[in-house]
Image: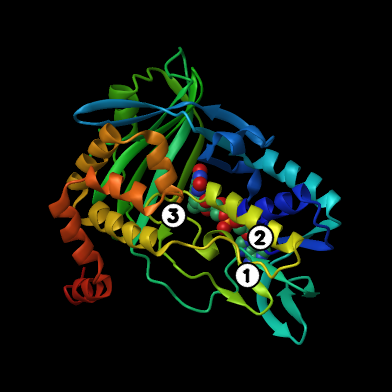
Amino acid sequence: MLGAGASGSAVVRALAARGVAGPLLLVDDGSVPIAERVWASWLAIEDAADDAVISASWRRLVVATDRGERVLGLTRHRYVAVRGPDLRDATDAALRTVRGERLTATATAVHEDGDSVVVATSSGDVRADLVLDSVGLLDAGVREPRAWMSFAGCEIETDGPVFDRDAVRLMDFRVPQVGGATFAYTLPWARDRALVELTTISAEPTSTRPDIAAHLDRVLGAGRHRVVRRESGVLPLAPRLRRPRSARGLAIGAAAGLVRASTGYGYARMRRDAARIAEQLRRGEPPSGLRRSARHHAMDAVFLELATHDPATLVDSLDLLFARTPADLVLRFLDEATSPREEARLVSSLPTRPFVAAAVRAGRPFARGRALRRQGR
Ligand SMILES: Cc1cc2nc3c(=O)[nH]c(=O)nc-3n(C[C@H](O)[C@H](O)[C@H](O)COP(=O)(O)OP(=O)(O)OC[C@H]3O[C@@H](n4cnc5c(N)ncnc54)[C@H](O)[C@@H]3O)c2cc1C
């Protein structure tokens, strides 16, 4: 297993849960230190209930635009957070039950050799029957991202009780829109402690940041506070329909396209993918994991087209979507778990003309990319 982040850990835990024994080697070089990581995501209630690694959960989401706030009660989902150290401990416990061990090394190449696969690492070659790769070594092709998600924020402690502990502010568009769709996100750990981030989805990675202090002050009313931790990142949004594989290798995680391009979320899908891979291995089948749906893939492209080139329409449409559709259905749609009939219901709540125009534009992204490059943009 290459990489002990979200997807590698999920597969190890899924194997242990099904009693699928190794030997298994979990290779990670620590280049993305897990101790500082936090993943947040919605999960179906039954999945959230049986996952001991979840450290906090929420029942309500808030989506806000200039028209006001919508508080969305979740009946079939919970929004949850998982802290890196907890995930690492749970993965170590799972490794012990599957005859697994960790190797701290950098994996540099993978090649098939007869009936096995060889991974070159900084600690020497490792021969295996199968490699699951979350570090991108099976990926031969270069994909041009359709958009970029740039985010920056901080965990703060306030002097007084400020936050509603039971409501995650998923998207608050009442921030200056800088070069794409920009929103604030607030994850309240306690009444006086929260992670607050500003996220922009734009055609190019952006270093322009709207003023987070203004949002803390004017919208959240945070008052006097201390910054406990800072977080920032840039995520290329490159939708991928087919996952890289070889005769004895399969990409997992972001490298497999499991980060949904329209949301930047991947944790829940990696969990489902891991469950499927572990089940296939338990049955003695070659693992293939979750299949991406071509319909959702196409809809991601339209969403990104709007986010990057017509964010005002996107914000109005999201407002309409959450006004007319139960939040649980929207979350299942974002998980690619909806039927065509449910998607027709979702789509019918959206304004037709700008979406059709965006779909047409999204169908020719490479032509547009070439045109922009010709213009020197
Ligand atoms: C800053 C940030 C925050 C995110 N937050 C969320 C979130 O809250 N919720 C959500 O659903 N999604 C989130 N995502 C999207 C996505 O779900 C995560 O990036 C997720 O961690 C991807 O899982 P992964 O297993 O593919 O990669 P990772 O979790 O990054 O794991 C890869 C592992 O491989 C190791 N590694 C890398 N290269 C090598 C190498 N050559 N050899 C050996 N080891 C190597 C790294 O140390 C790392 O531990 C976030 C993305 C980013 C960039």
Tell me which residue sits at (42%, 16%) in the image: 162
Dot 1 amino acid type: Leu
Dot 3 amino acid type: Arg
The secondary element bearing badge 1 is classed as strand
Residue 237 in the image, given as x and y percentages of width and height? 39, 59
Most extreme residue toward the left is 353
Dot 2 amino acid type: Ile
Tell me which residue sits at (69%, 34%) in the image: 52
> Label 2, label 3: how many angstroms apart (C-alpha)?
19 Å
Residue 41 in the image, given as x and y percentages of width and height? 51, 40
Disc 2 to disc 3: CB gap under 8 Å: no
Quarter assignment of residue 54: top right
Q: Earlier in the sequence, mark 3 or mark 1?
A: 1
In front: mark 2 or mark 3? 2
Per the image, the residue denoted by label 2 is: 277
Most extreme residue toward the front is 341
Between 235 and 71, the residue placed more toward the observer is 71
